[in-house]
Image (cartoon, grey):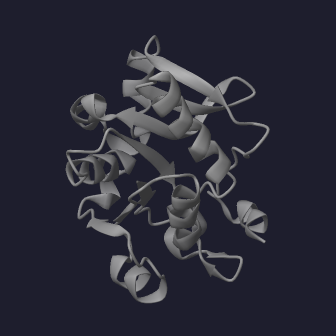
Amino acid sequence: MLLASGGGSRLGGRPKALLPYRGRPLVEHGVRLLRDGGCTGVSVVLGAAADQVLADADLTGAQVVRNADWETGMGSSLRAGLAELPRDASAVVVALVDMPGAGAAAVARLIGEHRERGAELAAAAYGGRRGHPVLFAARWWDAAAEDARGDAGARGFLAAHAADLRLVECGDVAQAYDIDTPDDLGRLG
């Protein structure tokens, strides 16, 4: 699942999903990294400028979830996305559209940790520090959604379940930067 509903308030109101990345909207890169990492289905949660994102970006094959409450923060996007996932899925990998450096290899490592070693909660780590993307086994979806509030997303839930959370080092295959301010735009290339 790609959370891509933010309005980019620190970017002067430019929706992050539409930021140009390698000649295409950033949201397309997020969908591609999930697919290339091994996700069999991809959901994209849209909010700010959803109609424009749908008009400008190629989201072919992705399930689009509209979050009418996107202005309340990432928590509402996580809730909206989790509510629309297929109930026969074993897990979901949640990625953020504004973190293009967290690539397919990090997604693949999380999926491998789930499939091969039974991890039910796993997060990419960078130098031992928890980052994104994050994998939630299906049994955690309701609890994570219930706890998701404001811009913190699943941060409180993950902190409360730290003993269950497996950190998967990804610093050698991914980068943990995000695009939040005009100064960060140079990272998009």
Q: Quadrant of the N terminus?
A: bottom left
Measured along the vertical axis of the image, is residue 55 above or below residue 33?
below
Q: Position of residue 100 (x, y in %)?
A: 65, 58
Question: With respect to residue 119, does 9 lie above or below?
Answer: below
Q: Give the left or right position of residue 172, taking residue 161 as reference.
A: right
Q: Is residue 165 among the parts visible in the rendering?
A: yes
Q: Residue 134 in the image: x percent, y percent?
A: 49, 38
Does 100 sit left or right of 93 as displayed? right
Residue at image point 62% right, 28% down? 168
Identify the residue at image location x=46%, y=24%.
Answer: 119
Query: Which residue lies at the image location 52% right of the left edge and 56% below the top edge?
Result: 34
Q: Is residue 6 left or right of residue 113?
A: left
Q: Is residue 87 above or below residue 10?
A: above
Nearest the eye: 69 or 9 = 69
Is 178 left or right of 73, judged from the image as shown?
A: right
Q: Is residue 15 visible?
A: no
- What residue is at 77 percent from the left and 63 percent from the top? 187
Q: Residue furthest bottom?
A: 55
Coordinates of residue 137 in the picture (x, y in percent): 35, 32
State the image quarter where residue 181 is shown. Answer: bottom right
Relative vertical location of residue 4 with respect to residue 26 in this rendering, above or below: above
